[in-house]
Amino acid sequence: MESEIEKFASKVGLRLLNGEEVYRGNDGAVYRVPLEVNGEAFIVHSVQSALVASRPEIVGRKLDSLVTHPARLVAGYLRRSGLADRKVVFMHVLRGSQGYRLDVALREAGFSVESQFVKVVYAGGLGEKHAEAKPHVASAQLTGLSGEEKTLVVADTVATGRTLKEALRFMLDMAVFKGVQFEKVVIYGFISESGARVVGDFLGENGITPLFFALEDFAALASNQYDMPLYGPDIGPRGVDAEKTIAGVSVPEALRAMLGEYFPGMDQPGDWSERQCLLFNGYGYERGKIGEHLERSLKSLEVLHNAVRGASWYEEWLEEVFKKRRKGLKRAMGVDACTPE
């Protein structure tokens, strides 16, 4: 007999997988899932990452605190399983990578972490919002490779996969000159299902096994090639299509934690870089534009609400979710999220 959660998931097209729990910590667990992607796929669920994915008002110092929890789950699993060598190369895709805190968690778990920095830009456009723009590496800081490293780790937001694919292409080319032959690549963050396929296929062509660790779900990717919802209406060049729903892939534990907090169609990572207090841009640190992220999120929330509240799949209880998110965003706008308490 289907549970209410399973019925709702079926209604909006969200696929629930029976994940194999491979690691459990105090606040959550790591699940191996049978996703059709080149490599191994895992969903990382914790109370904290479910809140981060559902509540765009979580920014600044609070974001730093909460995202550390799922990162520790992944670091703990990698240490216990032996899937990653204790000496890893960590590629930061600028600017938002450090906000995932995985490098910090790996060091806490006893890994030796050699940090590298790569910045990808788009000719003729900014970020993955511009599907026709071509990505290329604009700058990089690569130091300390000895030739002994076998595991490359990346923390990044993977929407179309084009940014990460270009960064990986550059990194693998540079590794050749250092005599480094990576055998595994660990990819962690908010990841879309289609983005995982793009990156997985690229790494497979290069003889490398990818390990994908997605926060809460492998997200859907909207037609605008940017927004990464858990589920909800598609968003394209002409705006919101309320009756065309898209949905990602998750596990029951994650969906159960998010259902009463997440408003359909919202981009789970949001403006990930801009949710952070400080961002390393390859040369120095700059402040994240938290206020702009909050304003855009509130506008998106209201546009989505107006578009979907009359849709056939819309449930009455989602009105309460909308009110909570609107209240939370407005409250966050009046707070300096980066001032020490």
Image: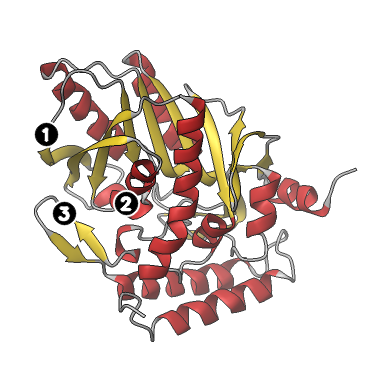
Give the residue pinned by disc 1.
143
Discs 3, 2 touching: Cβ within 8 Å? no
Q: Quick check: 231 left or right of 283?
A: right
Q: Amino acid at mark 3?
A: Asn
Q: CA distance from mark 1 to mark 3?
A: 17 Å
Q: Which mark is residue 129?
A: 2
Residue drawn at the location 16% of the way across and 17% of the way down: 176
Could you classify mark 1 by the number of other residues whose Cα lies within 10 Å: few (under 14), some (14-19), or many (20 or more)? few
Q: Residue furthest right?
A: 1
The image quadrant that residue 173 belongs to is top left
Identify whether 184 is placed above or below 106. Answer: above
Alpha-carbon neighbours of circle 3 within 10 Å: few (<14), some, or many (≥20)?
some
Residue at the outermost front position: 110
Q: Which one is nearer the viewer's eye here, 69 or 267?
A: 69
User: Which dot marks residue 281?
Assistant: 3
Disc 3/disc 2 C-alpha distance (Å):
20 Å
Which of the marked residues, 1 or 2, is nearer the chain's N terminus? 2
Amino acid carrying label 1: it is Thr
